[in-house]
Amino acid sequence: MKKKYCIICGKPLSNGIIIYGRGICSCCEERLIKLENNLDFYEYYRKRIKKTIVHYIIRGETIHCQNYRF
């Protein structure tokens, strides 16, 4: 089985959450939960998630998600 890595920090994933086959380690998950949206880290996390996960979620849903904005 291929080793999974955190999509945020790139460290090997030993625990955390898996979304559509992509992992977020528990450390980054905790930071995301506590993060305020006016910080630079918020934009960084948002872009990392958008780059690696969002296109899996909305694939095939273009008819229903035409006005989707992330």
Image: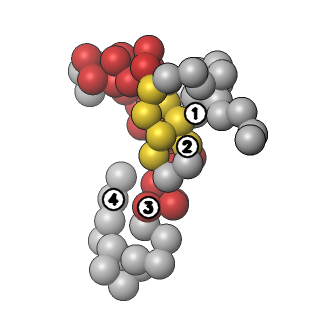
- The image position of residue 21, as x and y in percent, is 55, 48
Separation of residues labelled 3 and 4 (CA atoms)? 13 Å
- Left or right relative to 50: residue 10: right
Q: Which mark is residue 69?
A: 4
Q: Is residue 22 above or below residue 4?
A: below
Q: Which residue is at a point 75% across and 40% down the rendered structure image?
A: 2
Q: Is residue 11 above or below residue 24?
A: above
Q: Nearer the viewer, mark 2 or mark 1?
A: 2
Q: Tell me the residue that label 1 is attached to.
A: 7
* Within-10-Å neighbours for mark 1: few <14, some 14–19, many 20+: many
Q: Secondary structure at mark 1?
A: loop
- Left or right relative to 47: residue 12: right
- The image position of residue 24, as x and y in percent, is 49, 30
Q: Tell me the residue that label 3 is attached to.
A: 57
Q: Mark 2 near mark 1, Cβ–Cβ under 8 Å?
A: yes
Q: Tell me the residue that label 2 is attached to.
A: 22
Amino acid bearing label 2: Arg
Q: Nearer the viewer, residue 20 or 14?
A: 14
In primary-sequence order, the first of circles 1 and 3 is 1
Q: Which residue is at a point 33% across and 74% down the rendered structure image?
A: 65
